[in-house]
Amino acid sequence: MWQVDVYYLKAGELEIPRRSFSIVMAGNTPDEHKYQVKVLDKILEETGGKISPVGEDPTFKKRDFLTMIKACFIPRLAFRLTGTFQVDGMIGMDTQDAASLGLKVNEGHRDKYARMGVIMEDGTLNSWGVSFEGTHFALFECGQQYSAINMESIKGRQQMENEGFEICYKTPFSFSWVARCEEFLKRIGPTCCNFHDWMRKIKKTFDPNCVSDPMNYIPAEESK
């Protein structure tokens, strides 16, 4: 296993670059692994990419390896500085090009609310994503850190989420978790084959007594 670390040291302190990638590669054989490294080196050469020398430090290698195992390489550990986080209304699961466009659009969205003081300004972009289907498709989410004890931050977070939803509605992106809310279902349902109505019918058929909690999914009945 081999990793391109994304961290840098400056003046004795850890500094995270605004844009970076963490790449984990695993091969079935040593030769396959060598080929993967060769391809990555070629990509870095053609794009001007660089590998941080800090990533070769034994302490950082051990830390990254343990973090990857303990968190299944889920970036949620990055959101513990404020104790909570949100996906800011923007999310996408489509082609690599669509994901790249979404991350680009989200940058301005994120900076706007960072300047307003709604979310934590940590100097980097907390978007993350994974590729699949041989890297033909990708998923991205844009997580932001806010204060759960500051009402202005909480209200601003909701505004940010709603605005992110509007961006997704007007662009070729998916919708965030807020799409579960009834007001959004009524809006996007008709544009997506009325999927919410069909899901309700399935829920009523297989779980008429609502034994399975639908809180994180489409409710069996419309809210009053």
Image (cartoon, rainbow, N blue to C red):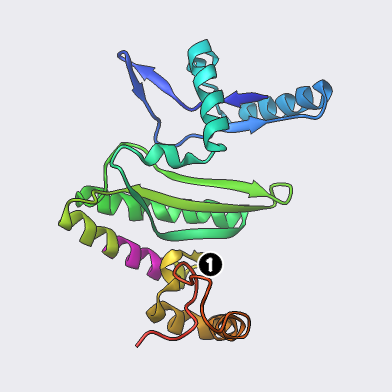
Q: Which residue is drawn at 35% across and 39% down?
A: 80
Specify the amino acid type for callout 1: Pro
> Residue 157: x and y, percent?
27, 58
Q: Which residue is drawn at 30% across and 61% down?
A: 160
Q: Residue at x 45, y 80 (%)?
A: 185
Residue 134, relative to residue 15: is it above or below? below
**Image position of 197 (left or right of 156):** right
Q: Where, quadrant-wise, is the C terminus in this rendering?
A: bottom left
Q: Nearer the viewer, residue 74 or 223?
A: 223
> Residue 114: x and y, percent?
26, 48
**Image position of 55 (left or right of 206):** left
Query: Dot 1: few (<14), some (14–19), or many (≥20) neighbours within 10 Å?
Result: some
- The image shows a total of numbered marks equal to 1
Residue 67, relative to residue 216: is it above or below? above
> Residue 208: x and y, percent?
56, 84
Q: Where, quadrant-wise, is the N terminus in this rendering?
A: top right
Magenta part of the chain: 159-167
Q: Is mark 1 on a helix, strand or loop?
A: loop
What residue did someone put label 1 on?
172
Magenta stretch containing residue 162, yes or no?
Answer: yes
Magenta stretch containing residue 82, yes or no?
Answer: no
Q: Which of 207 and 3 is in front in this view?
A: 207
> Residue 5: x and y, percent?
52, 25
Q: Quadrant of residue 105?
A: bottom left
Q: Quadrant of residue 88?
A: bottom left
Q: Which SS does the magenta portion mostly show?
A: helix
Q: Nearer the viewer, residue 53 or 217?
A: 217
